[in-house]
Image (cartoon, helix red, strand yellow):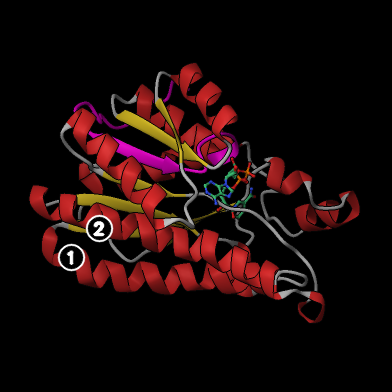
Amino acid sequence: MGNISFDFTGRTAIVTGGARGIGLEIGRHLRASGAAVYLADIDEAAVGEAAAEIGATGARMDVSDSEDVERVVATAVEETGRLDIVVNNAGLLRDGVLWKTSDADWDLVQQVHLGGAFRLTRAAVPHFRAQSGGRVINVTSYSGLHGNVGQANYSAAKAGIIGFTKTAAKELARFGVTVNAISPNAETRMIASIPADKLAELATGIPLGRFAAPQEMCAAVGFLASEEAGYITGAVLPVDGGMSM
Ligand SMILES: NC(=O)c1ccc[n+]([C@@H]2O[C@H](COP(=O)([O-])OP(=O)(O)OC[C@H]3O[C@@H](n4cnc5c(N)ncnc54)[C@H](O)[C@@H]3O)[C@@H](O)[C@H]2O)c1
C-alpha cells in the first residue's frame, strides 16, 4: 500500500482478526503509516506469518476470551508503553435460517463479533484514559444495518455492534476517545464462503457494481484512527460501494 494518508508514528494499534482479509490489510496500512501494530487472531500460525510479512507483532488472541484479550493488551502496552488504536475486526460466519440455528452457533457469533468488540474496548479503556485519548474502530456489516436471510445470528451481532459503538462513543467522549464503525464489502475468505449464485446476485445490488479489494477498507480506518478525525464519534461509515443506502 503506497497511499499513506496519516502519520501514526509513535502510536500503537491492535487489530483483531489480523491474520488475513480486511484485518491484515488494515494492519499493513497502519504499519506502513508508522504505527507499532499488533495483529491478533485465533489462528496462531497464520497471524504469525502475516505479522512477519508486514513488520508487525503477531499475537494469538481469541476475542471471546477475556484473559486472551487482556494479555495481548498488556503485552502491547508493556512493549511500546502505550495503546492508541483498537480495530475490532475479528469475525466468522455460522449461517443458517434462524429456525435451524443451534444455540452454539448463535452464541459463538455473538461472543466473537459483539463480545469481542466489547472485551477489547473494555481492556483498552484504562490506557486510553491514562493517555487522554484513543480510537476505537468497530466493524459492522450490511446485515447489521438491514438484515440478511440466513444470518439472524450475524445480523444481531453486527446490529449490536452499532448500538455498542454509539454507547461507547457517549461514555468515552469525556476521555477524548472516539468510537466509530465501518461497514465493509470486500472480497475475502468470508465472502468466498457465499455460494456463487448468491454472490452474483449480491454484486448486482452494489451501485458501484463490485465487491472491493480488502485494501479499499484501509483509507476509512486510517481516517477514523487519525488525529484529524477527532470530532467524529458514534458514526457508522459504509465502505460498501453504496450497497447499504
Ligand atoms: N468481507 C466482507 O465483505 C465483509 C462484509 C461485512 C462485514 N465484514 C466483517 O469484516 C470483518 C473481517 O472479515 P473478513 O472478510 O476479512 O473475514 P476473514 O474470514 O478473511 O477474516 C476474519 C479473521 O477473524 C479471525 N477470527 C475468527 N474468530 C476469531 C476469534 N474468536 N478471535 C480472534 N480472531 C478470530 C479469523 O481467524 C480470520 O483471520 C469481520 O468482522 C466481518 O464480519 C466483512
Q: Which residues are magenta?
A: 1-22
Mark 2 crowdedness (10 Å alpha carbons): few <14, some 14-19, many ≥20: many
What number is the disc on residue 178?
2
What number is the disc on residue 68?
none
| Circle 2/circle 1 CB separation < 8 Å | yes
Residue 243 position, x and y percent, is 64, 60
Q: 184 or 99, which lies in front?
A: 99
Does any portion of residue 232 appear in the rendered image? no
Q: Is residue 92 left or right of residue 183?
A: right
Please tell me whether residue 83 is drawn above or below residue 207 in the rendered image: above
Q: 147 or 168, which lies in front?
A: 168
What number is the disc on residue 173?
1
Magenta-colored segment: predominant secondary structure: loop
Residue 67 painted magenta: no
Three-letter code, disc 2: Thr
Q: Residue at x 52, y 72 (%)?
A: 159
Residue 187 position, x and y percent, is 68, 41
Q: Residue at x 46, y 64 (%)?
A: 115
N-term-proximal mark, 2 vs 1: 1
Does any portion of residue 119 appear in the rendered image? yes
Question: SS of the residue at dot 1?
Answer: helix
Q: Is residue 10 left or right of residue 242?
A: left
Please tell me whether residue 53 is drawn above or below residue 217 in the rendered image: above
Three-letter code, disc 1: Ala
Residue 93 position, x and y percent, is 68, 57
